[in-house]
Image (cartoon, grey):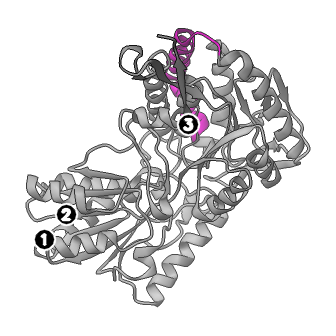
Amino acid sequence: MTAPTTPIPVHLHIGDRRLAQASGGTHDHIYPADGSTTSRIPLAGAAEAQEAVEAASEAFKSWRRSKPIERRQMLQRLAQLIRDNDAEFGRLGALDNGTPATFAAGGAHIAAEWIDYYAGWADRIESRVNSTVMADGELGYTLAEPYGVIGVIITWNGPLISLGMKVAPAIAAGNTVVVKPSEMTPYSGELFMKLAAEAGIPAGVINMIPGSIEAGDALVRHPLVEKVSFTGGPVTARKILAACAEQMKPAVLELGGKSANIIFPDADLDAACTFGVFNSIGMMSGQGCAFPTRLLVHTDIYDQVVERVLAIAAHIKVGDPFDAVTTSGPVINEAGMNRILAMIETAKARGAGTLLMGGNRIGGALASGYFIEPTIFGEVDPDSELAQKELFGPVLAISRFRDEAEAIRIANATRYGLSAYAETRDLGIAMRLAEELKSGCVLINQSRNIQPKRPFGGLLDSGYGREGGKEGLDEFLRVKTVGIGLPR
């Protein structure tokens, strides 16, 4: 395994200060591919959260009045700098969470795409006239204004992409941000902050504080934080909402998922199965909230699909994140590995489905890391825990359906509603599914998820609010109505 030979320095970024020590203690970052400690990460406590919010609040006074074209140009420079450093982001992403370096480098281009998209909105924020002097005897219009300080809390599975999705629209709209990234993935954020400064974004506009639970709580509860944007799980989200409720503070929540991928008999089975396998148990070792981790297959083609899926999955190369041939790395940490393996054993013991492939920790040369075999269950009971609960690992559950109505019923029978997928050449089926599936996104025939031009977000236990599209910008603007009575 290619791990760093010397520790990588990580800091808290508060205003124009870079802190190597903080009141929240430290966290030993573990490289998940071999279990080695790569760095000791300083953790913010409540004190540093307070300082970061104050720095962001001070920066907001001038940032909100900055010329929109200048905000656009800074964000465009940042996007290009991220592209220029894709190889380094690939290296740091592999160290962060074990994502293969080639895929992590591709994530840099996705993040840059989001930043470029919202750069384009920075000087296109408009007001709307809603009454006129001639008709109403007054001038009435709206102002779309930034909130102020936004508290941003992101999780560990895609830190750089999350920064692009959240920070870019917030600051394009004129807000400032305090970001609390996961201490488990500190390195991508460190480079991001360096490049933000190089792009000319003023100190205090973006503050980053990897920190303790106390830091996150202090950030959410701070009265100068006007809105919270959170990516993570429903349990933490409920605690955030409870804290926000005390101040009537709005939030955007992008939470988990248990997305279904429905394959109909008329689909291109080779393309559908390749997409279904790679995007569920191949990419990021299945650690993605919007991944299609349930495969619903029409009974007429069930055996054909299972045969294809197993053949494709057999070619997933699990291994060293720095090996160019690796397509899937380890899961995030030992605790995550043990949780996933325990859920697999529970599914086997309860007869939730038939284990067709995998289900074990990988030994041999990978024994020191947190590697799990790509795992596939067939004939899965749609009501079982295996089909209902988010595993967040390389586990695919395949179930049968007899007709369109049953497919919709099974797909909708969870507490999640982040994404839904389907494979069919029948436009009528596709259009009906788009309306009937309870999900924030419905994606037909391998349509790419999480594009900046389209709103992304969920419902139920998958959260609420939207990232992407103009709706993602509007999350960081609030509307003020102005009426001016004029003498006739």
Check disc 2 and report its element: helix, strand or loop: strand
Where residue 263 is drawn, which disc sits there?
2
Residue at the spot 40% in from the left edge and 18% down from the top edge: 132
Q: Secondary structure at mark 1?
A: helix
Residue 12 % position (x, y):
80, 34
Between 473 and 195, the one lying in front of the other is: 473
Using the image as rendered, state which of residue 364 and residue 137 is in the foreground.
137
Q: Are marks 2 and 1 in contact (CB under 8 Å)?
A: yes
- Mark 1 and 3 residues: CB-CB less than 8 Å, in contact? no
Q: Is residue 207 magenta?
A: no
- Which range of residues does the magenta coloring cover? 65-93
Q: Amino acid at mark 2?
A: Ile
Residues tagged 3 and 2 counted as in contact (Cβ below 8 A): no
Tell me which label, 3 or 2, sits earlier in the chain: 3
The image quarter in which residue 71 lies = top right
The mark that comes first in sequence, 2 or 1, is: 2
Q: Residue furthest front?
A: 488
Residue 301 image label: 1
Q: What residue is shown with label 3?
A: 166
Amino acid type for the residue under numbered disc 3: Lys
In the rendered image, residue 245, in percent from the top left (x then y), is placed at 69, 56
